[in-house]
Image (tube, rainbow, N blue to C red):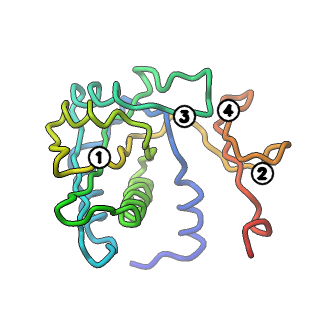
């Protein structure tokens, strides 16, 4: 299967950080497993393949994990998704430190690949690094003497509009919600990032 450069560019632009979801259209355990299978085929530094994945998909597990997550630090008045807007699945990504101590590059590659693959299936997500790692380890039986909990990817059917806009009037890149509750993500212009 081939994808045109235009189609791929559109896919990347559509792949935003979604923080509100449609709970009536859950993401299945099968789909979450498929996303991990895709990530398993990604490049890995020294081909070490040290990332490990914990799939969270039941309503009870999702509710428990939600309490250990922090959402959208720049939206000071927003406490995160309401119960009717919460993710319907998660993938916890860990590093097996017996294989490799630091897998930051692998982590970025795998997480972005998971989100792009989710987008092609009509789902979206958000990478969450502001997480309560000790709580997650306790609640999900993750041995922190061996595994570093790196990231949680929240997933589901997006229930919000997210759009790319130009820089804010003060030149900052701080995301915000406009008067129509559209989540706006400022991006620097190409001319400002080319050296």
Residue at the spot 39% in from the left edge and 57% down from the top edge: 111
Local crowd size for mark 2, using a 10 Å CA cut-off: few (<14), some (14–19), many (≥20): some
Question: What residue is shown with label 1?
Answer: 149
The image shows residue 73, relative to residue 83, as above or below, that is below
Real-space CA distance between mark 1 and mark 4, rounded to the nearest whole angstrom: 30 Å
Residue 2 vs residue 49, the one in the foreground:
49
| Foreground: disc 1 or disc 4 | 1
Residue at the spot 14% in from the left edge and 37% down from the top edge: 141
Local crowd size for mark 1, using a 10 Å CA cut-off: few (<14), some (14–19), many (≥20): many
Nearer the N terminus, badge 3 or badge 1? 3
Percent x, y of residue 186: 71, 48
Percent x, y of residue 67: 34, 24
Question: What residue is shown with label 4?
Answer: 177
Nearer the N terminus, badge 2 or badge 4? 2
Nearer the N terminus, badge 1 or badge 4? 1
Label 4: element kind? strand
Residue at the spot 75% in from the left edge and 67% down from the top edge: 190
Question: What residue is shown with label 2?
Answer: 166
* Res. 130 image quadrant: top left
Real-space CA distance between mark 3 and mark 1, rounded to the nearest whole angstrom: 20 Å
Real-space CA distance between mark 3 and mark 2, rounded to the nearest whole angstrom: 19 Å
Nearer the N terminus, badge 3 or badge 2? 3
Question: What residue is shown with label 3?
Answer: 72
Marks 2 and 4: CB-CB under 8 Å? no
The image shows residue 115, relative to residue 55, as above or below, that is below
9 relative position to 62: left or right? right
Label 2: element kind? loop
- The quarter of the picture where the C terminus appears is bottom right
Report the number of discs.
Answer: 4
Label 3: element kind? loop
């Amino acid at each position: 299967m081939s994808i045109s450069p235009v189609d791929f560019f559109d896919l990347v632009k559509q792949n935003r950080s979604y923080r509100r979801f449609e709970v009536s259209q859950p993401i299945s355990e099968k789909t979450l497993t498929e996303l991990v299978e895709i990530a398993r085929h990604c490049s890995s530094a020294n081909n070490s393949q040290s990332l490990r994945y914990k799939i969270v998909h039941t309503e009870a597990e999702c509710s428990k994990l939600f309490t250990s997550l922090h959402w959208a630090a720049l939206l000071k008045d927003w406490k995160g998704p309401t119960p009717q807007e919460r993710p319907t699945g998660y993938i916890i990504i860990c590093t097996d430190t017996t294989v490799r101590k630091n897998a930051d590059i692998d982590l970025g590659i795998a997480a972005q690949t998971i989100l792009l693959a989710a987008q092609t299936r009509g789902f979206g997500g958000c990478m969450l690094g502001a997480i309560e790692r000790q709580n997650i380890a306790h609640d999900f039986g993750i041995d922190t003497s061996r595994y570093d909990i790196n990231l949680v990817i929240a997933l589901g059917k997006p229930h919000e509009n997210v759009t790319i806009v130009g820089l804010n009037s003060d030149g900052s890149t701080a995301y915000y919600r406009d008067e129509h509750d559209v989540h706006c993500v400022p991006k620097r212009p190409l001319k400002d990032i080319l050296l």
